[in-house]
Amino acid sequence: QVRLVESGGGLVQAGESLRLSCAASKSVFSFDAMGWYRQAPGMQRELVATVTRGGSTNYADSVKGRFTISRDNAKNTVDLQMNILKPDDTAVYYCHAEEMRFLRYDYWGQGTQVTVSS
């Protein structure tokens, strides 16, 4: 069974940085894509950043230039470096992985809270 475990959330002030890490229970190369999503109170879950098996990345417009997604193949982790944080970045951040094996399988972590104070 695939497990994704996030870490690194916390409370910071606007303008500061945080780094989230997602540890997968198997090789990150086994997934077609991995990424980070977030959900603020009363809002729908939204994509933050993704990285494909081939290394292509995609970012939400709201985080471009501030957030960077990276993958460590040796550690089986996917990290999200978040700089110049804003109060609007406050949300629960979820790690996600997907793979296609005849059917599409989606996996989610339990989430980690990020709170940015103004």
Image (spheres, rainbow, N blue to C red):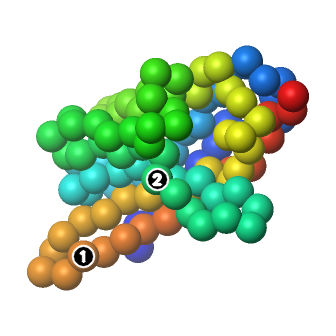
Left or right of 103? Residue 36 is right
Q: Residue at x 70, y 57 (%)?
A: 40
Q: Position of residue 18 (x, y in %)?
A: 66, 27
Q: Secondary structure at mark 2?
A: strand
- Label 2: few (<14), some or many (≥20) within 10 Å? some
State the image quarter where residue 51 is shown: top left
Vertically, is 83 above or below 96? Answer: above
> Which residue is the extreme one toward the right?
118
Q: Position of residue 84 (x, y in %)?
A: 65, 20
Question: Would you name the residue on which mark 1 appears?
Answer: 104
Query: Mark 2 belongs to which amino acid?
Result: Leu
Q: Earlier in the sequence, mark 2 or mark 1?
A: 2
Question: Would you name the residue on which mark 2 appears?
Answer: 47
Q: Which mark is residue 91?
A: none
Vertically, is 47 above or below 14? Answer: below
Q: Quadrant of the C terminus?
A: top right
Q: Residue at x 41, y 49 (%)?
A: 35
State the image quarter where residue 25 is shown: bottom left
Vertically, is 116 above or below 44? Answer: above
> Which residue is the extreme one toward the front?
61
Q: Nearer the viewer, residue 61 or 114?
A: 61
| Separation of marks 2 and 1 at Cα, in angstroms | 18 Å
Q: Secondary structure at mark 1?
A: strand
Q: Nearer the viewer, mark 2 or mark 1?
A: 2
Q: Residue at x 42, y 68 (%)?
A: 107
Q: Position of residue 97 (x, y in %)?
A: 37, 59
Q: Nearer the viewer, residue 83 or 9?
A: 83
Q: Residue at x 12, y 80 (%)?
A: 102
